[in-house]
Amino acid sequence: MSKGPDKPVQVVAETPRSVRDEILQSAKMPEPTEQQASSPTEPPFDISAPLARIEGTGQFIESCLQRIRELETLVEQSENKQAETAAQLRDATQRTTEVEQALAFERERSARAEKLAAAVARRAKELELARSDAHQKLETLAGALEGTFRELPDLRGSLREAA
């Protein structure tokens, strides 16, 4: 394997095309000291294969950078979606807590209403018993008064005579 000339490697912050052109141009114009040092029997160094690999690597790096940008965009969108979902979850949790509190209040209110309804039903029964008892006493009293009035002499006739 033949070795290329030992030149210092320069990192150029340019597009791969300009790097390729620069490499081709420097390969076409050998330095005067190299011409004297190299023998005429040595074949010229072909840089097209390494240059193609460099260009392919540059394209691969560009595609990787593009994919990285796409992935960063996806990550950002995912983070935004996650933040939005977290906010929705907090809102839903807050609403659930409010509904649970309202439900507990309604249960307590319902229990109080049931106790009140039971107390009203007991009082209604008591009043019904008292009414029934009073009705019986009234009937008994009416019967006693009727019997007493029957035993009394007929005062109507004597009142008429006196008048």
Image: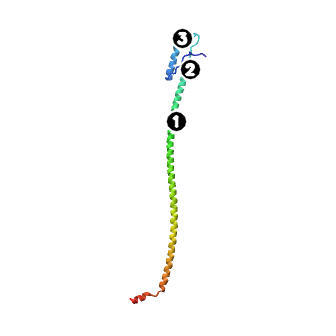
Q: Position of residue 160 (x, y in %)?
A: 40, 88
- Whole-angstrom CA distance, mark 2 to mark 3, is 24 Å
The residue that mark 1 highlights is 75
Q: Residue at x 52, y 36 (%)?
A: 75
Q: Position of residue 62 (x, y in %)?
A: 52, 27
Labelled disc at residue 50: 2
- Whole-angstrom CA distance, mark 1 to mark 3, is 55 Å
Between tags 2 and 3, which lies in front?
3
Circles 1, 2 touching at the beta carbon (< 8 Å): no
Q: Position of residue 38 (x, y in %)?
A: 57, 11
- Say above or below: 96 vs 143: above
**Of the residues shown, which amino acid type is indicated by label 3?**
Thr
Farthest-out residue, right: 1
Q: Helix, strand or loop at disc 1?
A: helix
Nearer to the camera, 54 or 153: 153
**Of the residues shown, which amino acid type is indicated by label 2?**
Pro
Q: Helix, strand or loop at disc 3?
A: helix
The residue that mark 3 highlights is 33
First-in-chain label (1 vs 3): 3
Please identify the quadrant where the C terminus is shown.
bottom left
Q: Position of residue 140 (x, y in %)?
A: 51, 79
10 Å crowding of disc 2: few (<14), some (14-19), many (20+): few
Q: Residue at x 50, y 56 (%)?
A: 106
Farthest-out residue, bottom: 161
- Whole-angstrom CA distance, mark 1 to mark 2, is 36 Å
10 Å crowding of disc 1: few (<14), some (14-19), many (20+): few
- Say above or below: 120 vs 67: below
First-in-chain label (1 vs 2): 2
